[in-house]
Image (spheres, rainbow, N blue to C red):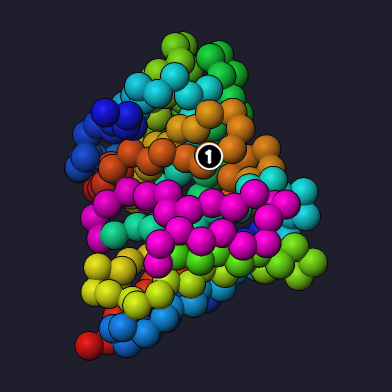
Amino acid sequence: EAQVTQNPRYLITVTGKKLTVTCSQNMNHEYMSWYRQDPGLGLRQIYYSMNVEVTDKGDVPEGYKVSRKEKRNFPLILESPSPNQTSLYFCASSPQTGSGYTFGSGTRLTVV
Amino acid sequence: GEDVEQSLFLSVREGDSSVINCTYTDSSSTYLYWYKQEPGAGLQLLTYIFSNMDMKQDQRLTVLLNKKDKHLSLRIADTQTGDSAIYFCAERDDKIIFGKGTRLHILP
């Protein structure tokens, strides 16, 4: 089944403790992206990647890192999480052109 | 900069038609999308329209595009309780820009 898989689905962590949210897609998509969703703010893009080893900042990249060492994986790294990074995170992928994103099921992160 | 605007809430009676509206700013957008997000779930692509089209129909869904006014709408015929969700409009040129979403509430 074609899908984007994020893990974990839920995570509670403490301020400053490094964490990684994994994202994997099995559709051979070139384009991958991370979004955070917050009430009243909609979806905001954190980072995106047009292909392997090509990553770019989105609208809210501060406090996040990403890597794209292989086509299928696009992990999101929070080196030193803070409470303002408490949010619902979505990974998405698409072919380079057209047909829109396929989204993962989301990761609800709480930083205390 | 690029922006996508949509109203935040819409209430519709079950069985009526729902019309969700969206405006966008980037005239070079090549694709425009409608996504649906049900509670606790990710976004699901409902339908999309190429920028050179005026209308697209898919069962109960009708998408209308007015390029001159940069206006996109989604009509859901015979709205049902399962249509209760947040609907996101999005445009794509080199990357996808999302609106803040319209929460559709179904009245009995």
**Left or right: B70 as drawn, with respect to A66:** right
**Left or right: A112 as drawn, with respect to A31:** left
Residue A28 seen in the figure = yes
SS at circle 1: loop
State which region is magenta.
B39-60
**Left or right: A46 as drawn, with respect to A59:** left
Classify B76 as above or below A38.
below
Residue at x-position 55% and y-position 14%: A53
- At label 1, counting other C-alpha atoms closer than 10 Å, the crowd grade (few under 14, some 14-19, many 20 or more) is some
Residue A10 at x, y percent in the picture: 20, 42
Residue A95 at x, y percent in the picture: 53, 29
Residue at x-position 57% and y-position 69%: B73
Between residue A25 and residue A23, name the one nearer to us: A25
Residue B106 at x, y percent in the picture: 29, 80
Residue at x-position 32% and y-position 87%: B13
Amino acid under label 1? Ser
Pointer 1: what residue?
A99
Does the magenta segment cover residue B97?
no
Q: Quadrant of the C terminus of chain B?
A: bottom left
- The picture quadrant where one finds residue B55 is bottom right
Does the magenta segment cover residue B48?
yes
Classify A108 as above or below A17.
below
